[in-house]
Amino acid sequence: MQLFGSSGTRGVVGEDFTPELVRQVAAAATAVWDADRVAVARDTRRSGAAFTDVAAGTLAAAGADVDRLGVLPTPGVAYYCATEGVPAVHVTASHNPPQYNGVKLLGDDGTELSVDAYERVERRVFDADASLAPWDDVGRTRRIDGVADDYRADLRSGVDRDAVAAADLTVAVDPGHGAGCGVSPAFFRELGCSVHTVNADPDGRFPGRDPEPVAANLTALQRLVRTTDADVGVAHDGDADRAIFVDERGTVIDGDTSFAALAAAELDRDDVVVTAVNVSQRLVDAVAAAGAELDLTPIGSTYIVTRIRDRREAGDRVPIAGEGNGGVFFPEHRLTRDGPYAAAKFLELLAAADGPASEAVAPYTDYYFVRENVAYADETERDRLLDAAEAYARAADADLDTTDGYRLDYGDAWLLVRPSGTEPKIRIYAEARDAERARHLAGDLREHLDERRERSG
């Protein structure tokens, strides 16, 4: 797909993300859905209100009644879609920096659109194949209040509140000024936890930290955990479909590590875990220990959702799925990445463990993961870098997988290079049990790409 990447479409506001693009996407989506009613929501970004106005106006002009939900996490929008039976346009750029915005499309079953559905919307955008309603069929718009409260009640229904409350946990929460501000702190208190917060005021400038919950952005949360003697810290991205954790010592728990720990707690023999091609060996080992099956997809929630549907239709049980970036699905609760729900399942894990968070994840920490980004200026440079990556991969003495980019399995380590689905960057991932080995693999490929760029320049 050209317009929609690994999870909707995103871009820098005023450059490649514009009101006209939002209008085109909303009009095309309305035509594909053929729905009488559509929901619209957003995250906290400063540009969000203006773009939701465009989306809502376009949907109404196309003949759909519009439910305006305001600021809401993506999983909260998914909850509304599933319970009301309506699709939604969610204006969010998720973990991207403040200058970005984007659109995710959710179906009336509460899941992000499949690859096929996104492709149908994209074709209509490019073909300008969408029509407006006559004056007497224009839709009506209404504001819907209280969705966040209803969503929290739904979250509670899928969590063992008694076990979490009995554990008497202290939780430090960093919603990152995003859509999780109005959900997670209150939700964890409703589970019986003592809660402390940082960056918990909704602010689309993201003054406290960038929206992506990576270790470099979580120093305030680490400090809060240590100063409050919290049992665990929880961080979200801008639309709260991710959860990253900090242990009781103030150390960030890698997303691959928490994913493996959560999977180990959920899996039975012959279950299936769906994840992306950049899967960590930590998860591979946890799945093997449970006697379960691993099913790999291209990177991105859209591809994972599509594969989960396929496996469940085939009769397989998929209790957990996702990626090591903190975006975890619990499909038996709802088929969407849900940061608050994943955090609650981690609290369940801590309640059941005979020890602190650091010990609960200890079996999955003896791995070293490196990620590097190579930015490119335009499509020509992107293609040159990918050509160089392909040549490097095909010349390597390793098993090659081309599901999404080029993944090299060396036996004791793996390396992956692929274009980002949301930013103008080439991603390089490497993992090994030895830190120097992982750094060397990523660095060698990075050096190869940089040399190719210098020669081309």
Image (cartoon, rainbow, N blue to C red):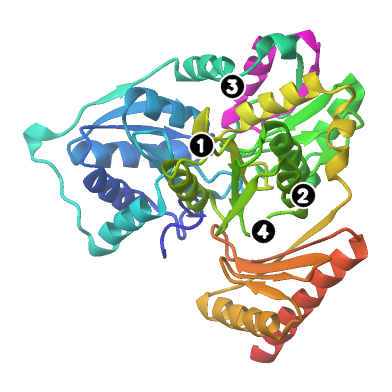
Few, some or many C-alpha atoms within 10 Å of disc 3 (few <14, some 14-19, many ≥20)?
Answer: some
Whether the magenta-drawn stretch holds residue 175 is answered as yes
The amino acid marked with disc number 4 is Asn
Badge 1 marks a residue whose secondary structure is: strand
Who's the residue at 31% across and 36% down the image?
Answer: 56
Q: Which residue is mark 2?
A: 285
Mark 2 or mark 4: which is in front? 2
Q: Examine the rendering and report whether any part of residue 31 can be seen.
A: yes
Few, some or many C-alpha atoms within 10 Å of disc 1 (few <14, some 14-19, many ≥20)?
Answer: many
**Whole-percent x, y for residue 42 in the image:** 46, 35
Query: What separation in Å lies between label 1 and label 4 (alpha carbons)?
Result: 20 Å
Q: Examine the rendering and report whether any part of residue 72 can be seen.
A: no
Q: Mark 2 or mark 3, which is nearer the start of the sequence? A: 3
Q: Which residue is mark 4?
A: 278
| In this picture, residue 317 sits left or right of residue 257 | left
Q: Quadrant of the C terminus?
A: bottom right
- Choose top left, top right, bottom left or bottom right for residue 55: top left
Q: Which residue is mark 3?
A: 183
Q: Which residue is mark 1?
A: 336
Who's the residue at 56% across and 50% down the image?
Answer: 99
Query: What separation in Å lies between label 4 and label 3 (alpha carbons)?
Result: 30 Å
Q: Quadrant of the N terminus?
A: bottom left
The amino acid marked with disc number 2 is Asp
Which residue is most to the bottom?
A: 455
Q: Which residues are magenta?
A: 166-190
Reply above or below: 96 against 392.
Answer: above
| In this picture, residue 404 sits left or right of residue 280 | left
Q: Mark 4 or mark 1, which is nearer the start of the sequence? A: 4
